[in-house]
Amino acid sequence: MSQSDSYQVPSHPSGLEMRTQLNIIVAAIIGDNSGPEAPTETYPGMMWGDTTANRLRRRNNTNDDWIDIGPLDDFLGDLRTDIDAMSGKCVLKAGDTMTGQLVMQGTGMRLDQTDGTQGPTFAYDPALGVGYINKAGSAWIFRVDDVGGVNASGGLNVGGGGTFGARVTINNGGELNLHGAASFYMRPGGNGMEWVNNAYNAVVASMDDGGTFSCQDMNARGNVRASGAVFTTDGNLWMPWANDYLSNQLGAKAPNGAQCQYNSGLIEGAAIRDDPSPGAVADFGNPWVCIGQHQTYSQWFALRAIWLRNA
C-alpha cells in the first residue's frame, strides 16, 4: 500500500530519478492509492483505498468528492449483503409468487395485453379510492372509495346478460340511489319498501309486506292495477265485478239530496166522488206517483200521476 505525492515525472530527470518516480506511481496505482488519508494530488476517477475506514473510494467526475464503493478487501461485499437481505423479497418478472403485503407507490399499474396492446390501469387515488382507469387514461371505469362506495361507469352486471341475473342483497338498512337528472331513493321502511324524493325529505310512495301500496299523488304516466281493478290516471276506477267504471255507476244514480225528475207525461186516473162509497179504490201501479187531483165535476175529481226516475 502506497501513495505518491505527485503523479508527474520531473522534467529532464536522470534515468535513476525517472525509474524511481515511475515505480512510486505504478505502486500507488496498483494499490489503489491506499493510505489512512486521501491522496494530496487527486484526479477524476482516481481510486483510494481508505485504510482507516477500510473502504474503497472513487473520485467523482468533478474531482470535488469521494464516492464510497464498498469494503476495501471486498468491494462487492455490500452488494452481496443487500442481495442476501432481499432473498425471498424480490418478485421475478414472470412466474413468481408473492406473499405478505405488497406496497405499490405511484400512479398505478397498467395491464397491457400479451401483444403489447395498451390496457386499463389499476390505480389508487387518496381522494377517489382504488379501481381501474380506461385504456385512454381519461376516466375511471370502476372504483371503490375508502368507505366502501362502489362506482361503475358502465353499470353493474350481476350474473351476465346485461341484467341482474342473481339475487342482490343490501344489508344493514342500505338503500338504492337511482340517479339520473335527479336522484330517487328506494329503502326499507314501514314494514316494507319506501320511495323517497330527490330532496330526501319526503316518502312519496310505499308498499308494506302485504302488498298494500300508498302514494302521495298520481300523474299521467300510468295506471295502478291490483287484482284486476284499475285505478286510472284521471282518478277513475275500473271495477271488474261490475264490468264498468265507477264514474258510470255513480252517474246512474242521483246523489244524496238531489231532486228526482219525471220521465213521463202526466196521466189522470178515473174520476171519483169526494164522498166515495166504502171500499172504492183508485190505484196507480209502480212506478207512477200521485202528484195531485183534478176537479172534473161538482163532486167528482181525478187523481193525477207521473213516472219518476233518478236524476
Image (spheres, rainbow, N blue to C red):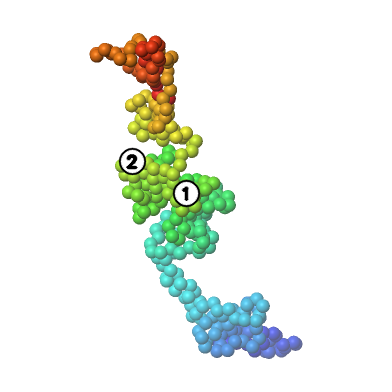
Residue 116 appearing in the image: no
Which of 58/236 is in front?
236
Q: Work out whether 295 lies above or below 227.
A: above
Which of 230/209 is in front?
230
Q: Work out whether 66 lies above or below 197.
A: below
Residue found at the very far right of the displayed protein: 12
Q: Work out whether 83 lies above or below 54.
A: above
Q: Residue at x 53, y 52 (%)?
A: 140
* Residue 46: quarter of image: bottom right
Helix, strand or loop status at disc 1: loop
Image spot of residue 34 (x, y percent): 56, 85
Location of mark 1 (residue) = 197
Going by the image, does 229 lie left or right of 119?
left
Location of mark 2 (residue) = 211
Residue found at the very far front of the displayed protein: 298
Return the mark for residue 274: none
Q: Residue at x 52, y 46 (%)?
A: 180
Q: Work out whether 37 lies above or below 115.
A: below
Which of 172/61 is in front?
172
First in sequence: mark 2 or mark 1? 1
Q: Residue at x 36, y 17 (%)?
A: 288
* Residue 205: quarter of image: top left
Helix, strand or loop status at disc 2: loop
| Crowding near the residue tagged with mark 2, few <14, some 14–19, many ≥20 C-alpha atoms within 10 Å | few
Going by the image, does 257 lie left or right of 7?
left
Question: What is the CA distance from the residue labelled 2 to the residue labelled 1?
Answer: 21 Å
Image spot of residue 74 (x, y percent): 48, 77
- Rendered-image quadrant of the C terminus: top left
The mark tally for this picture is 2
Instruction: Specify the amino acid type for callout 2.
Output: Gly
